[in-house]
Amino acid sequence: MIKIAILGFGNIGGGIADVIEMNKDTIAEELGEEVYVKYLLDLRDFPDSPYADRVVKNIDVILNDPEISVVAETMGGVHPAADFSEACLRAGKSVVTSNKAVVADCGDRLLKIAAENCVKYIFEASVGGGIPIISPIIRDLTSNKIESVRGILNGTTNYILTEMTSKGRSYADVLAEAQALGYAEKDPTADVGGFDTARKIIILAALAWGRLATLDDVKITGITEITEDDIKEAAGKNCKIKLIAEASMSADNKLVLSVAPRTVKSSSLLYSVDGVFNAVEINGNAVGRLVFYGSGAGKLPTASAVVADIIEVSRRRSEVLSRLEWTKLEPGMSDISSVPSVLSYCE
Ligand code: HSE
């Protein structure tokens, strides 16, 4: 039996426990043994949960238990999630996460610590929720030079813009609903301000080019200034406004990263990406353009990706991610002077 711990028993942490229970036969068949949630780390108590007796408050319980081989971190925010992840890796436990803030801020360091301790640090759920996007980049596209990456990477803002466009609903009303549906971050400023999307494009760029940028390297505009008039004006031109993230390398080898609301033409594949759905377009110099599409947020889609990572590290045969090495982007090696302007057309 593979015994795991989940850090954070919120929406995603609960989803992981649900997927493990819902698909226990399939998972056991895949691995040849069952996955068992031994601990849930959370400051809160959950007296009505079937997992009530497995809730612990002290990370040391998990760190000191040799039976725990995999830890799923779904706490959100950088601290203490990054410190707990580091401690787990140093204790010889693989860590899987949906926490893009930690991956974007500390992914280089945590990957190195994982390699030094012969365990894995993997994060399929950190970008695009349930969409398999990280594994394809590092496994299936290694024969390509990645030329550009772009996409709709935030479910909350896409849901808000879609509802405003199709039903004429107000921004505040839809945001409240997105929070209730479990799409939005604890502090939804991260969503509507474009920072969550920026962290995701930072992660995709690091996967594509090996350099981990910071938020300061990204030209970020969120959706807070988008008005109903902007939306109507776009609709009048048979377009939709979407929050688009883009990453590319300039001719002088600098990373060009941006997040901005753009006017998406109906001829673009991104035009039809509505609601909580995300899409990621990748251009490889051999394969051409690829598009990955699916649920970008939500309990079970995100948990689907985390549990797949739990299965992957539990197989103990994947070497792919242990070879992943990122270094911090050097100062002066990003360039936002050429990024498209807010509401400019997106083909
Ligand atoms: N708040 C995020 C979103 C959750 O809306 O996309 C998934 O990363």
Image (cartoon, rainbow, N blue to C red):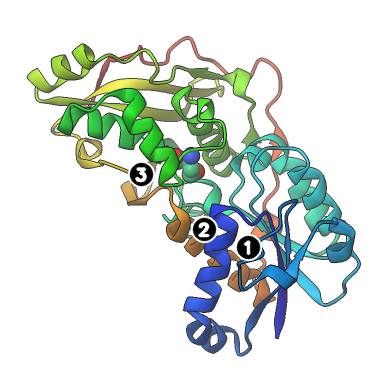
Q: Amino acid at mark 3?
A: Asn
Tell me the CA gap for discs 3 and 2: 17 Å
Q: Residue 50 in the image: state x and y as whole percent.
A: 61, 73
- The answer to whether the residue labelled 2 contacts the one labelled 1, judged by CB atoms less than 8 Å apart, is yes
In this view, the residue in front, 298 or 144, is 298
Image quarter of the C terminus: top left
Vertical side of 44 occupied by 213: above or below: above
Image quarter of the N terminus: bottom right
Residue drawn at point x = 70 percent, y = 43 percent: 107
Asked if the beta carbon under badge 3 is closer than 8 A to the nearest atom of ligand 1, the reply is yes
Picture quadrant where residue 154 is located: top left
Q: Tell me which numbered mark, 3 or 2, is placed earlier along the sequence.
A: 2
Q: Residue under circle 3? A: 278
The single residue placed furthest to the front in the displayed view is: 47
- SS category of the residue bearing label 3: strand
Q: Residue 111 in the image: state x and y as whole percent.
A: 74, 50
Q: Residue 186 in the image: state x and y as whole percent.
A: 57, 37
Q: Nearer the viewer, mark 2 or mark 1?
A: 2
Number of residues whose C-alpha sits closer than 10 Å to that of mark 3, classed few (under 14), some (14–19) or many (20 or more): many
Q: Tell me which numbered mark, 2 or 1, is placed earlier along the sequence.
A: 2
In the image, taking residue 144 as reference, residue 50 lies left or right, namely right
- Give the numbered dot on residue 135: 2
Q: Residue under circle 1? A: 320
